[in-house]
Image (tube, helix red, strand yellow):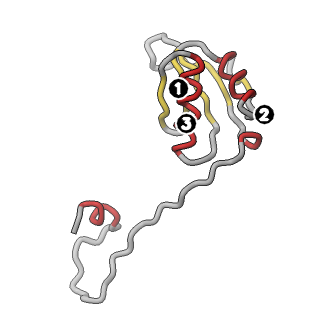
Amino acid sequence: MSKKNKKGRRGVVFSTDPDYNYSYEEQEEETTLDPSEQKLRVFIDRKQRKGKEVTLVTGFVGNSDDLKNLGKLLKSKCGVGGSVKDGEIIIQGNQREKVVELLLKEGYRNTKKAGG
């Protein structure tokens, strides 16, 4: 039995029942909303970053591959680094105006600036 199969079992280590079938947890693929239906918020964050500013994009609804592709697009268009973690896109520096403009051009109509 491979390690992949062992991880999916929920709490059952061994069963003496010869007819017992392990039930594996199936993960549903989350469908990505159209860009015009997304409600994205773009704001500047300095918390727990030693005073450095980052631009956060939150509110994306969809699978992680589409989120990573959007993050890659924003990072390349802004010419800076960043990452995609916990459903958020993190762009280095104060790029809020540029990110909002790029998202609007890409069809994300419900994009708003948030925060101060």
SS class, disc 1:
strand
Badge 2 vs badge 1, beta-carbon distance below 8 Å: no
Indicate the amino acid at tag 1: Ile
SS class, disc 3:
helix
Badge 1 vs badge 3, beta-carbon distance below 8 Å: no
Q: Earlier in the sequence, mark 2 or mark 1?
A: 1
Whether residue 1 is situated above or below residue 31 in the rendered picture: below
Name the spot of residue 47 as percent of width and height, x first.
Answer: 50, 19
Name the spot of residue 99 as percent of width and height, x first.
Answer: 65, 21
Viewer-proximal residue among 79 and 2: 79
Name the spot of residue 98 as percent of width and height, x first.
Answer: 67, 17
Residue lying furthest top in this view? 51
Which numbered disc, 2 or 1, marks the residue closer to the eye? 2
Which numbered disc, 1 or 3, marks the residue closer to the eye? 3
**To which residue does mark 1 refer?**
90
**To which residue does mark 3 refer?**
69
Indicate the amino acid at tag 3: Asn
Give the quadrant of the C terminus: top right
**In the displayed structure, does residue 60 sit left or right of residue 111?**
left
Using the numbered discs, state the Cα–Cα distance from disc 2 to disc 1 in whole angstroms.
20 Å
Which numbered disc, 2 or 3, marks the residue closer to the eye? 3
Image quadrant of residue 55? top right
Badge 2 vs badge 3, beta-carbon distance below 8 Å: no
Q: Earlier in the sequence, mark 1 or mark 3?
A: 3
Viewer-proximal residue among 4 and 21: 4
Which residue: 33% across, 67% down?
A: 9
Which residue: 75% across, 43% down?
A: 37
**To which residue does mark 2 refer?**
109
Using the numbered discs, state the Cα–Cα distance from disc 1 to disc 3 in whole angstroms.
13 Å
Which residue: 49% across, 33% down?
A: 84
Indicate the amino acid at tag 2: Arg
